[in-house]
Amino acid sequence: MIGEDHHVDIRRPSTDEVFGHYQRLVGEPELDVAACWAVVVPHDSLDSLSLPEVSARLGGGTSYELREAVKPHFVNLPLRRQGPCAVVDRSGAAVVLYGLDHLGYSSGALRRLSSNARVYSAWWNVNSVNRLSLTVNGDVLVSINGLFPGRPEDHPNLASWPELTAMSEFFLDYVDEDFTGRDDNWDWRAGFLTAIELATGVRLDRQWLDVEHPYLVFSGPIPE
């Protein structure tokens, strides 16, 4: 009926659906060997962060150029550069960062990025060295190794990331005395990206990887 107020219920994907998406995505060439992905979400009462502001925070005083556009795979190419390179773009009120270098985002960079914001970060390299973290207002509240995540009670600030707490398969269900890691072949890389999407609503997908985005080139190493 014309004039009638209709409420449209847009169903959010379930945890299993999101996890299935990332199980497929982490097999793509850009993510299979190594990946570095962060989502910067400003506090609710604040305006969205600009790309230059995020770039300056990440650099911590290192000079940089914010260039026009490039496809994300560019940051993975073995090009000769003075400093690291990262794709940076907007996703609603959030800013996303893809790529930096083989060491991921330093704790200092995450603290700077998290001023009046929450920064969800996932990183792994070819040797399966990895880290999932949440940094808020300059404090790294959660920092987890995906191979040896331990138990929820091992992470005192886990309540600050309820979407991760709800992922029951993320954490080990036994005491890993022999340090053998997970014994169920659970895909921790997909788990990392699932936890970030559930918390932020920001999805990394094939479409995002296939289009051009602004990118940063730093003049030298980024300070801790």
Image (cartoon, rainbow, N blue to C red):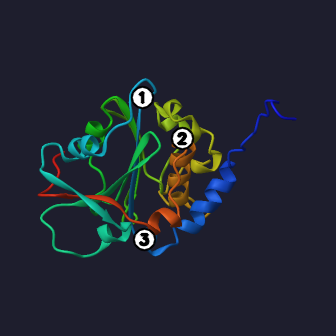
Q: Nearer the viewer, mark 2 or mark 1?
A: 1
Q: Is residue 67 left or right of residue 6?
A: left
Q: Is residue 186 left or right of residue 1?
A: left
Q: Nearer the viewer, residue 100 or 148?
A: 100
Tags 2 and 1 in contact by the CB under 8 Å rule? no
Look at mark 2 in the image and give the residue it sits on: 199
Q: Residue tagged by mark 1? A: 43
* Amino acid residing under circle 2: Ala
Residue 119 position by quadrant: top left
Q: Residues within 10 Å of mark 3 (few under 14, many from 20)?
A: some
The mark that comes first in sequence, 2 or 1, is: 1
Who comes first in sequence, dot 1 or dot 3? Answer: 3
Q: Residue furthest front?
A: 2
Residue drawn at 43 percent across, 66 percent down: 211
**Residue at image point 30% right, 67% down:** 75
Quarter of the image that includes the C terminus: top left
Displayed quadrant of residue 95: top left
- The residue that disc 3 covers is 30
